[in-house]
Amino acid sequence: MRELALHILDIAENSVNAGASMVRISIHENTLADRLSFSLTDNGRGMDEELINQVLDPFYTTRTTRRVGLGLPLLKAAAELCNGGLTITSTVNKGSRVSCWFQHSHIDRMPLGDLVSTMTMLLIGYPDIHWIYRYEFNNRLFEFDDEYFKKELGAVALSEPSIISFLRGHLEEGMRGVREPLPLSVP
Amino acid sequence: MSTVKTLEDLKRIREEALEKKKAKATSGAIQVTVGMGTCGIAAGARDAMKSILDVIEADNLTGVIVTQTGCIGLCEKEPIVQVTIGEAPMVTYGKVTPDVAVLIMKEHVIKNQIVTGHQIHLP
């Protein structure tokens, strides 16, 4: 996987498989501190210490549990190559949190990639899950909580053409809004 | 149709979508499912799903339900897309590149003609 956005999609799938009803995805690009970090927090069934170690071990997990893929060990290795890391904290029956960080300017750091596609697909593909998406750029925040959105839509399916356009446009504009520098204020 | 991006426009979108849904209620439901396990994502499932959504958006196709699923155990055939129309049995496609995804949408979903060349049979 050549984009962080694809890894985020992959980790979110783990949350779905863990029976989560709520998943929060936070991404923080901090160019001032030269750090790119993201985390996924869910309320799924969680993991004990042993399982956490297993999901991070590429050789052990692939042969025993089909449900757990190579995604996390590969991402951890990629982060460590870029002066970063990956940690998992989890409580059984409460949920899990995967945090990952990179040196933002590191030459080997994967690009963030197409976050709008990742988010649009999770929102449309798993309509029963409550998705919260936070994108921060140098402490300026764009947040999208789909609860209000779904309440407004009622029985309308999220894969309707007008809804797809709306989601793509709304996410793109929101992220661009926090990335662009603030206009200079004239006194 | 103008694009809408603010949350205030949602009410209007809802009304429009519900009207279209009423007009289309006679034909059977169409469900398109994309496999999004690690194997699927690594093989390009997100690009396939992006193409599917692009066709729905560009051709203004209403009444198509697009969902995701995890690994179904045929990792070597990923990306996998499954189509179910009304009461007809589900059709499974393998190695779905973005181009194949467009073909599936144009032929199977719109014209109800199975794209035989890319169909796979589940064991």
Image: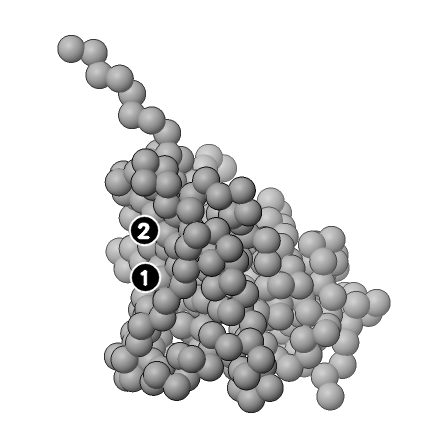
Q: Identity of the amino acid at label 1?
A: Arg
* Element assignment for label 1: strand
Taking the view exactly as shown, the residue that stands out farthest to the left is A187
Asked if residue B2 shows in the view, the reply is yes
Image mark for residue B15:
none
Residue B49 image offset from top left, x and y in percent: 59, 58
The foreground one among A174 and A179 is A179
Query: Could you tell me which quadrant the N terminus of chain A lies in?
Result: bottom right
Taking the view exactly as shown, the residue that stands out farthest to the right is B117
According to the picture, the residue beneath numbered tag 2 turns out to be A134
Residue A7 image offset from top left, x and y in percent: 50, 60
Image mark for residue A24:
1
The foreground one among B110 and A50 is A50
Question: For the residue carrying disc 1, how many other residues have a C-alpha within 10 Å: few (<14), some (14-19), or many (20+)?
Answer: some
Query: Could you tell me which quadrant the C terminus of chain A lies in?
Result: top left
The foreground one among B39 and B100 is B39
Residue B106 location, quadrant:
bottom right
Q: Is residue A59 above or below residue A128?
A: below
